[in-house]
Image: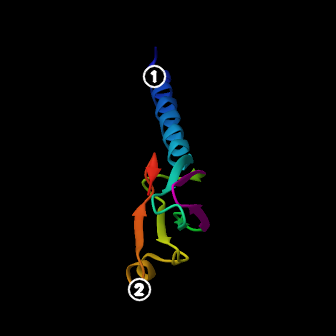
Amino acid sequence: MPVTKRSLAGLSGVMALVCAMAIAANASENAIFECTSGASQICYFNILRQPGGTQTFAVQGHQRIAMAGLAPGRDWYLVAVDHAAPASMAACQNANFRCKAAIVQRGTNR
């Protein structure tokens, strides 16, 4: 095979790999959010999507919910029990109630 054809074949292989990596980086996944508090309590979650956007939802104690379209390892979540989750990590750290800020993981987030 001539050098030019080998170079083009190699280049097209590299381009295919780069495209596959870009698609994988933008792929969304599901994650489970669980409220481990008492059955009469409610966990309020606030998802902070990277690079932007938020999503808020509530989960009854001893329940779990699956959320789609997340980027584990990149998106963050804030959770508070019986209080609305703050809109930012700084507000969570300075809250006068129990608030947790963590990065979204594959599997179950509590």
What residue is at 45 percent from the left and 22 percent from the top? 6
In x, y percent, where is residue 60?
Answer: 57, 61
State the separation of the CA atoms marked 1 and 2.
65 Å
Magenta segment:
54-67
Q: Provide the residue designation for mark 1.
A: 6
In this rendering, would 102 be left or right of 54? left
What residue is at 55 percent from the left and 46 percent from the top? 29
Badge 2: few (under 14), some or many (20 or more) residues near its Cα, within 10 Å?
few
> What scheme was used to colour the molecule?
rainbow
In x, y percent, where is residue 37?
Answer: 46, 63
Characterize the magenta stretch by its predominant secondary structure: strand
Q: Nearer the viewer, residue 31 or 43?
A: 43
In x, y percent, where is residue 108?
Answer: 45, 49
Q: Quadrant of residue 73?
A: bottom left
**In this rendering, is residue 97 above or below 26?**
below
Amino acid type, callout 1? Arg
**In this rendering, is residue 86 above or below 104?**
below
Q: Provide the residue designation for mark 2.
A: 96
Q: Nearer the viewer, residue 43 or 74?
A: 43
Amino acid type, callout 2? Asn
In this rendering, would 58 be left or right of 71? right
Badge 1: few (under 14), some or many (20 or more) residues near its Cα, within 10 Å?
few
